[in-house]
Amino acid sequence: MEEIQTKQVPCLDCDSTLEVVDDIEIGDILVCEGCGVELEVVNNNPTELDYLYVQK
């Protein structure tokens, strides 16, 4: 069984640590367990997050 590789990135709002898998893709959405903010992956090498923008 293959071990899943993860890395840690900080939440943009509360600095909690988010565990993300190495094969995360641009456009994936993460939710911080510490504060509930939704973040979008904007780069995957290195992993960069930005606030999720939802057009109304």
Image (spheres, rainbow, N blue to C red):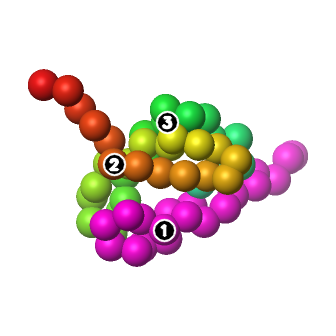
Q: Kindly indicate the quadrant of the structure image that contains residue 40.
A: top left
Q: Please name the amino acid that badge 2 sits on.
A: Tyr
Q: Please name the amino acid that badge 1 sits on.
A: Pro
Q: Is residue 17 magenta?
A: yes
Q: Is residue 23 magenta?
A: no
Circle 2 residues within 10 Å: few <14, some 14–19, many ≥20: some
Q: Secondary structure at mark 1?
A: strand
Q: Please name the amino acid that badge 3 sits on.
A: Asp
| Picture layout, residue 42 above or below residue 12 | above
- For label 2, the residue is 51
- For label 3, the residue is 28
Q: Where residue 48 appears, x then y in whole percent?
A: 54, 52
Q: Which region shows up in magenta?
A: 1-19
Which is nearer the eye, 43 or 2?
Answer: 43
Q: CA distance from mark 3 to mark 1?
A: 16 Å
- For label 1, the residue is 10
